[in-house]
Image: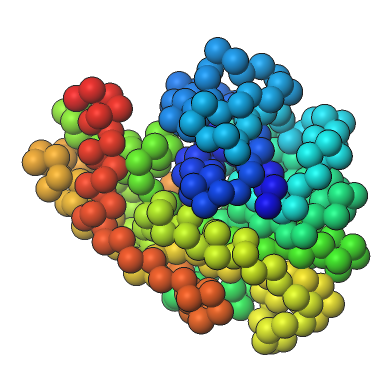
């Protein structure tokens, strides 16, 4: 099976590519390698998968030295002409779209980046799927679409019409756009609402990376909402296993509970939550980091940030029942794996 995987220099994309390659899939990975965070980390992920930095040039395929079934191309999703040519030449069977402008708080500072990558870029992906007989499009949504919903756990049957950040609005827009293309053109699409993913090679703007770095360097950590936060932290290997299960099971029109807005009466369309379904107090998460590092953090308690929410908790019963999804990585193990990687990567 030939798969286009976008965002392969990113955190989840890197891990997902390795897993799919290991099971023998033929992968073309693309990423624009933007500078939202340290590009050295992105190049390191690619290097770990056998993609030489020296060979990377825009719209040029680079063969992996590690996987004979992996090629990487630096390409921006807004480049509709070259993206269409890639689809035509490669004849993909399925597409996984993880490329996006990430980050809730950054969307307050640079909104145009979110429209370009998450709306225009996603439209280009949909158009290419429409014109090239793609058998299944799996794409990244986000738990941020739930906004200030207070009923827990968060379910795909919940109303998500009131986003509280532009990032969340773009992800909800992706779901609506996908349904439109599924309805009009019969493209099977599945959206995945990710819940706080963490693990080795994680993003430097995420809490685990920020806290670990600050504690090791003896700097205080910023703890928002005075520490009264809970997050459904989900280890990256558990996320990857869920994505692969979803990829292997394209939705059918009208194939599930019609009272659930995550399915459609008219289209091969589905939405899943993908998380650990076990929220953790932020203070407990910090304690797990402190325990592994054998260091205490100096905490600066701050109010809630704009666009943030006090709690996330995924109802994953749908994914568990239909696809036997069962995340099983405890926080202490996942945090420990990240810190082991961090120390090795930064030679501490």
- Judge whether residue 236 can be spotted in this image: yes
Q: Quadrant of the C terminus?
A: top left
Q: Compared to 209, does 284 lie above or below? A: below
Residue placed most toward the observer, 151 or 70: 70
Q: Residue at x 23, y 38 (%)?
A: 340
Q: Position of residue 236 (x, y in %)?
A: 41, 51
Residue placed most toward the observer, 324 or 114: 324
Q: Residue at x 66, y 38 (%)?
A: 28
Q: Compared to 11, does 345 lie above or below? A: above
Q: Residue at x 34, y 53 (%)?
A: 225
Q: Give the quadrant of residue 81.
A: top right
The residue at the far top in this view is 54
Q: Compared to 309, does 47 lie above or below? A: above
Indicate left or right for 333 with 18 as reference.
left
Figure colour scheme: rainbow
Residue placed most toward the observer, 55 or 203: 55
- Judge whether residue 174 can be spotted in this image: no
Indicate left or right for 344 with 127 as reference.
left
Q: Position of residue 223 (x, y in %)?
A: 29, 46
The residue at the far left in this view is 294
Q: Residue at x 79, y 77 (%)?
A: 253
Q: Position of residue 157 (x, y in %)?
A: 61, 78
Q: Position of residue 174 (x, y in %)?
A: 72, 55
């Amino acid at each position: 099976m030939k798969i286009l995987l976008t965002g392969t220099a990113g955190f989840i994309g890197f891990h997902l590519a390795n897993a799919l390659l290991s099971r023998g899939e033929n992968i073309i990975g693309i990423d624009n390698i933007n500078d939202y965070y340290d590009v050295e980390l992105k190049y390191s992920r690619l290097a770990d998968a056998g993609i030489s930095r020296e060979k990377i040039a825009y719209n040029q395929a680079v063969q992996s030295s590690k996987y004979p079934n992996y090629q990487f191309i630096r390409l921006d999703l807004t480049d509709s002409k070259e993206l269409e040519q890639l689809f035509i030449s490669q004849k993909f069977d399925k597409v996984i779209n993880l490329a996006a402008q990430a980050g809730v708080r950054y969307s307050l500072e640079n909104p145009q980046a979110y429209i370009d990558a998450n709306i225009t870029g996603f439209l280009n992906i949909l158009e290419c799927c429409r014109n090239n007989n793609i058998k299944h499009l799996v794409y990244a949504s986000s738990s941020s679409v739930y906004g200030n919903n207070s009923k827990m756990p968060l379910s795909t049957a919940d109303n998500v019409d009131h986003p509280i950040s532009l990032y969340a609005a773009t992800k909800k827009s992706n779901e609506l756009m996908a349904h439109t293309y599924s309805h009009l053109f019969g493209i099977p699409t599945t959206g995945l609402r990710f819940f706080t993913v963490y693990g080795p090679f994680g993003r430097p703007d995420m809490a685990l990376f920020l806290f670990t770095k600050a504690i090791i360097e003896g700097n205080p950590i910023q703890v928002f909402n005075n520490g009264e936060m809970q997050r459904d932290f989900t280890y990256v290997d558990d996320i990857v296993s869920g994505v692969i299960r979803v990829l292997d099971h394209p939705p059918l029109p009208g194939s599930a509970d019609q009272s659930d807005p995550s399915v459609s009466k008219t289209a091969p369309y589905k939405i899943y939550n993908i998380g650990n379904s076990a929220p953790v107090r932020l203070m407990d998460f910090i304690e797990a980091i402190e325990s592994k590092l054998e260091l205490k953090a100096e905490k600066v308690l701050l109010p809630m940030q704009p666009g943030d929410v006090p709690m996330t908790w995924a109802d994953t019963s749908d994914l568990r029942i239909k696809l036997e999804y069962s995340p099983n990585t405890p926080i202490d193990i996942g945090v420990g794996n990240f810190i082991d990687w961090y120390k090795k990567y930064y030679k501490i």
